[in-house]
């Protein structure tokens, strides 16, 4: 996907109140931007990091700038906007990048389902099958190219795994899709030390037939674009 306007950049001073960040521009002006990430942002909110942000033309917004990417480890780029994850996965499915999800005739998003008042991120269907796809954004990179999910305890994520297991038992196809917005991650694993319950549920779900795949994004800040390109392994 391409951003409507060129991304701007600056140096991160601090992230605070979950949804705000102060950034120093190259002109030395300091601005406050919106941070579209409810997670801990572990390892990708270090003051002094180079960040890139988009700008909205919506005059009603109090903070017109939105944080999109951050540079980590002096060369890797990380997408911090979790709101992009579903859009990136939908785009990758529609352009046939995701080999595992080709040959579906219909694609719907945010469809109510399950026993816990949930909404599935993506529902694919054809004459013979339905496939329920839950999308998770991965931004926590560790040593040796390992990406971990989640970066904080996620009761919501636990609920989604329980729902996917019920979907699988009903006879439909169920999939957990890790959208890896981190150019340095080469494989994805559950974050056992951060949320052991989620990790246990993930392993249980996969043992019961819930599929788990991961695709990594290419991030091009110069041309203001990002897209899922490469499949990487999920190691549990």
Image: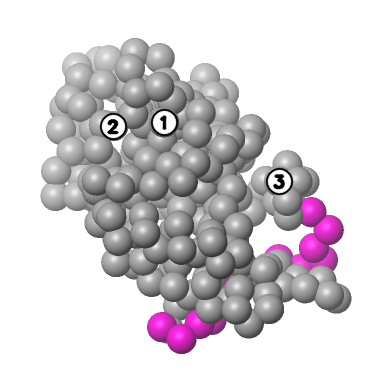
The alpha-carbon separation of the residues under discs 1 and 2 comes to 14 Å
Give the residues in magenta. 102-116
Label placed on residue 69: none
146 or 235: which is nearer to us? 235
Where 139 sits versus 127, above or below? above
Q: What is the x, y in percent for residue 166?
A: 53, 78
Choose mark 3 or mark 2, whichever is in front.
3
Is the residue under label 2 in contact with that under label 1 (CB below 8 Å)?
no
Of the numbered discs 3 and 2, the one sitting upstream in the chain is 2
Q: Residue at x 39, y 47 (%)?
A: 190
What percent of the width, then of the height, locates residue 94? 74, 51
**Rendered view: 196 above or below 14:** below
Q: Quadrant of the N terminus?
A: top right
Q: Which residue is mark 3?
A: 98
Q: Residues within 10 Å of mark 3 (few under 14, many from 20)?
A: many
Circle 1 sits in a helix, a strand or a loop, which is it? strand
Q: Give the left or right position of residue 92, taking residue 49 as reference.
A: right
Which residue carries the number 2 mark?
Answer: 44
Residue occupying the point 40% across, 22% down: 144
Q: Is residue 108 magenta?
A: yes
Q: Residues within 10 Å of mark 2 (few under 14, many from 20)?
A: many
Whether residue 75 is visible to the viewer of this picture, yes or no, is yes
Residue 202 placement (x, y as % from top left) = 44, 58
* Residue picked out by circle 1: 146
Comparing 160 with 217, the one in front is 160
At mark 3, the secondary structure is: loop
The image quadrant that residue 106 belongs to is bottom right
How far separated are the C-alphas under marks 3 and 1?
21 Å
């Amino acid at each position: 996907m391409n951003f409507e306007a060129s991304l701007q950049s600056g140096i991160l001073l601090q992230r605070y109140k979950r949804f705000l960040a102060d950034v120093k521009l190259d002109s030395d002006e300091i601005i406050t931007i919106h941070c579209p990430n409810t997670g801990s942002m572990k390892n990708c909110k270090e003051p002094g990091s180079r960040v890139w942000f988009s700008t909205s033309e919506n005059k009603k917004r109090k903070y017109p700038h939105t944080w999109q990417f951050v540079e980590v480890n002096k060369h890797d780029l990380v997408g911090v906007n979790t709101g992009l994850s579903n859009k990136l996965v939908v785009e990758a499915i529609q352009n046939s990048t995701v080999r595992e999800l080709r040959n579906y005739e219909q694609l719907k998003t945010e469809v109510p389902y399950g026993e816990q008042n949930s909404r599935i991120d993506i529902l694919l269907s054809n004459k013979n099958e339905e496939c329920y796809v839950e999308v998770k954004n991965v931004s926590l990179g560790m040593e040796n190219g390992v990406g971990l999910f989640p970066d904080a305890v996620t009761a919501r994520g636990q609920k989604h795994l329980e729902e996917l297991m019920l979907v699988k038992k009903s006879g439909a196809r169920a999939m957990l899709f890790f959208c890896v917005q981190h150019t340095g991650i080469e494989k994805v694993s559950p974050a056992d030390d951060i949320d052991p319950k989620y990790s246990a549920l993930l392993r249980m779900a996969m043992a019961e037939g819930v599929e788990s795949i991961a695709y990594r994004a290419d991030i091009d800040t110069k041309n203001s674009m990002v897209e899922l390109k490469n499949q990487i392994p999920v190691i549990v």
